[in-house]
Amino acid sequence: MPSDAWKGERYAVIWAQTTAEPDQVHNIGLASRVGIRMYLDVGPGGEPPSDMSIDRLTPERDATGRPVLAAQVHNTGGRALDLSGSLSLSDGPGGLRAGPYPAQLGVALRPGETGRLAVVMDARLPEGPWKVDMVVQSGLIKREVSATVVFPKAGIGRPVTPSGASRLILPSIVVALGLVAAGVLTWRRRRARPHAEPRRA
């Protein structure tokens, strides 16, 4: 690292590539490439906090007729997020339930960036209305939101603002480990404490 590197998170990628150039026999070139993403945190004070918000859910219909629910996710923390998630449907026409359906992968957000996380469902699903429960996660950060949506016959439907709770998995783990450690420490201290001798008259 350069000594004058400014604090913050940096992004990079390491590429490994092999190529076969076209020649007199083969008129098509070939390139094989694989990459590894790198996140480098520079500066004192430990890692910056990770956080996100799900600001909007939009029901859509793609070109093949499949219903799609798109979540607008905002990275409100100080680290990059690699998003994953799932969607469950309930209270549909006739009390139908469906899912869970996985979200499309490959969505990465830099700090302050807003992106789209989409879930594609079966084309045979009726339009609704449906109660949707969506989970979005990146590492130890998890957000769970709900809304009622109606999928359009084509194109983009009416976006809705979801309601729900935010949950950070890491603090729960830390609290649980802290309670266990405190219990073990108290037990050891009690065992190490000498017992009082009874007094003689």
Image: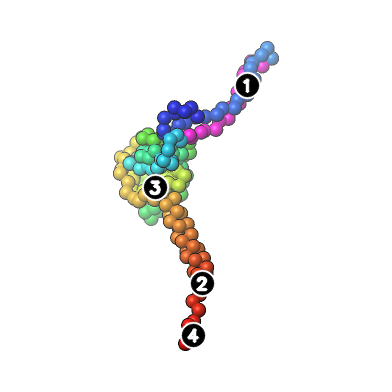
Residue 159 in picture, x, y percent from top left: 31, 40
Q: Secondary structure at mark 3?
A: strand
Residue at image mark 4: 200
Left or right, residue 12 beside residue 93: right
Camera-side mark, 2 or 4: 4
**Magenta span contains residue 31:** yes
Task: Say which amino acid is labelled 3.
Answer: Arg
Task: Say which amino acid is labelled 1.
Answer: Thr
Q: Earlier in the sequence, mark 2 or mark 4?
A: 2
Q: Earlier in the sequence, mark 1 or mark 2?
A: 1
Looking at the rendering, the stretch of residues picked out in magenta corresponds to 26-40
Q: Secondary structure at mark 2?
A: loop
Bin the neighbour count of mark 3 within 10 Å (Cα to Cα): few under 14, some 14-19, many 20 and up: some
Q: Secondary structure at mark 1?
A: strand
Residue 135 visible in the displayed image = no
Residue 4 in picture, x, y percent from top left: 44, 27
Bin the neighbour count of mark 1 within 10 Å (Cα to Cα): few under 14, some 14-19, many 20 and up: few
Tell me the number on the disc at residue 162: none
- As measured in the structure, the alpha-carbon distance from the residue carrying label 2 to the one carrying label 3 is 50 Å
Task: Say which amino acid is labelled 2.
Answer: Pro
Task: Say which amino acid is labelled 4.
Answer: Arg
- Which of the two residues, 34 or 56, is positioned nearer the viewer here? 34
Whether label 1 touches label 2, CB < 8 Å? no
Whether label 4 touches label 3, CB < 8 Å? no
Residue at image mark 2: 194
- Which of the two residues, 111 or 34, is positioned nearer the viewer here? 111
Name the residue located 46 percent from the left edge and 54 percent from the top edge: 173
Q: Earlier in the sequence, mark 1 or mark 3?
A: 1
- As measured in the structure, the alpha-carbon distance from the residue carrying label 2 to the one carrying label 4 is 18 Å
Name the residue located 42 percent from the left edge and 47 percent from the top edge: 142
Question: Is residue 197 depicted above or below 176 in this figure?
Answer: below
Tell me the number on the disc at residue 19: 1
